[in-house]
Image: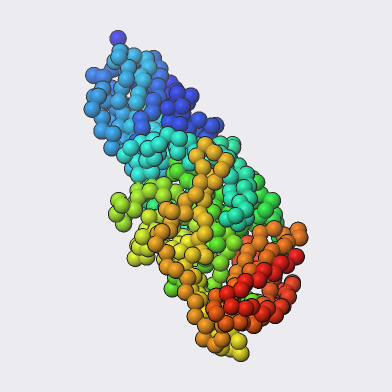
Amino acid sequence: SVNTDLKLKCVSWQLSENQKDHESEGLSSKHLVVRRGRPFKITLFFKDEPFSPLMDSLVFSAQLGELYVQFPLTFSRHVSAFKWGGQILSENSWSQSLRVLIFTPPNAPLGLYNLQLHIKSQAQQHSYALGNLILLFNPWCSTDEVHLSHADQREEYVKNDSGILFMGTPDNLLPRTWEFGQYEEGILETCLKILDMSPQHSKNSQKDNLCRSNAVYLSRVVCAMVNDRGVLKGNWSGDFSRGVSPSQWTGSADILKCWERSQCRPVLYGQCWVFAAVMCTVMRALGIPSRVVTNFNSAHDTNANLIIEEFYSETGEKLQLSKESIWNYHVWLECWMSRPDIGSEFSGWQVLDPTPQEKSGGIFCCGPCPVKAIREKRVDLFYDVPFVYAEVNASVYTAIVKNNQVVHQSLDANRVGSLVCTKGVNSYLAQDLTAYYKNPHKTPRRNSSLHGKTEIIFVQLPVAGQSISFSVTVVNNCGTSRRLKEHINAQMKEYSHNLLETFWEASNMIKLGPYEGKCATFI
């Protein structure tokens, strides 16, 4: 009989089994989605002739853009888990179909791969395009740089598509629900498109694809692409007439779909919690554990001296003599990854802040900055440790100015970063992260009066639109009588640090005997 060359009839991707095995169910209806470092199964069906291991050889190729790797299909049970490889599972080698196990290395670049099969039979060779598959990071794999050992944390920080963002003040947390939406139709493909639209990819697509194996690199690309040059345009002016007010967004999917539909023009508008939540969606979709974090009384240090300078008049009105500020709260992202670039002791949670504030490497991108480096004040490390350290740990220099002269000054190391929190695992309550960011040995507050005994006290009242009452108690700690002037000044402060004009003030003269205290109530 005449021998006929082996030809492929079709391939089964075994979608249900693979995506269940790879914790990727629901991420795409168009492509097989698998995680690197864990093998997946496919079944090859041949036409007229069965596969013969003596006559036929099978070679796979996987292509990501211009990157290309080939690997043979073998019966060997000793396939390396750190290289691309193929293993035949079928017991009957002479078969019309073959069950195949394909191995991907735990450091393979993330992306949309094209898989091909090359059949060599006698003098003939045939090549078949099997289709596309999406390869993601794998927190379930112990040799992946984003490995997260606790199952409940993987469920929360990778698979959970809904969450809570915290706003308000440390004493009055305002939870806001957010739908991350990584399982909505087309979102994963949109996340991959964000990578393809990056300047790094446009400049050198081959180098960019190769670098996508590294979580540090990838996170910086995504961080820069989420803000003004990519997915979202920031707006803190209060005028949102040309787009959507940031407070109206309730989830990431609508924003990402809008970006896709608009030929990748920035969506109008975002503020810090929107930037962070959208980036959280992208990172979770790509397989990197992520959580949204709120820092209350968050400093913005513009001159990198780790000190925030504030100037006030004698009546307590803030003077616009400094570009530095303290936000009521600021929201960023933490991503889990190893840091071999700066030392394994700094692996773990890393701060990534996609809100455009200060440039890093010439672009608006902040992080990944190890949380441990912030606590230890390792401002010599990258990326952006000094800036994030100041956001949580900056000292506040306060000066009272009279006739262009400083009459009182103080340094407070406790005001900034009063609470850092995130949504708890399997909980809707806030998890306090402050101790991971701040060293407990804080510098005490120091005051000095240069002329007289002027003092200023700051009180933040979180409720707007309602009547407010509060009391001020003044105590004379010396053995002689004192006559004091008490002045109350009230200004509205937006969450993003902008102060409006004084809307109410009151003055009062107080006479205090030795060691006497008096309480005044204001309504």
Residue at the spot 24% in from the left edge and 24% down from the top edge: 76
Residue at the spot 73% in from the left edge and 75% down from the top edge: 506
In the rendered image, which quarter contains the N terminus? top left
Nearer to the camera, 61 or 247: 247
Residue at the spot 29% in from the left edge and 54% down from the top edge: 343
Q: Is 462 left or right of 301, judged from the image as shown? A: right
What is the x, y in percent for residue 68? Answer: 35, 42
What is the x, y in percent for residue 59? Answer: 31, 30
Q: Is 188 left or right of 384, judged from the image as shown? A: right
**How is colour applied across the structure in the image?**
rainbow
What is the x, y in percent for residue 397? Answer: 50, 75
As drawn, 466 above or below 27? below
In the rendered image, which quarter contains the C terminus? bottom right
What is the x, y in percent for residue 43? Answer: 40, 21
As drawn, 457 above or below 154? below
As drawn, 428 above or below 488? above
- In the picture, residue 233 is in which quadrant? bottom right
Residue at the spot 54% in from the left edge and 72% down from the top edge: 324
- In the picture, residue 117 is in which quadrant? top left
Q: Is 444 left or right of 510, judged from the image as shown? A: left
Question: Is any atom of residue 258 visible in this view?
Answer: no
Nearer to the camera, 103 or 501: 501
Q: Is 151 left or right of 430, judged from the image as shown? A: left
As drawn, 330 above or below 453? above
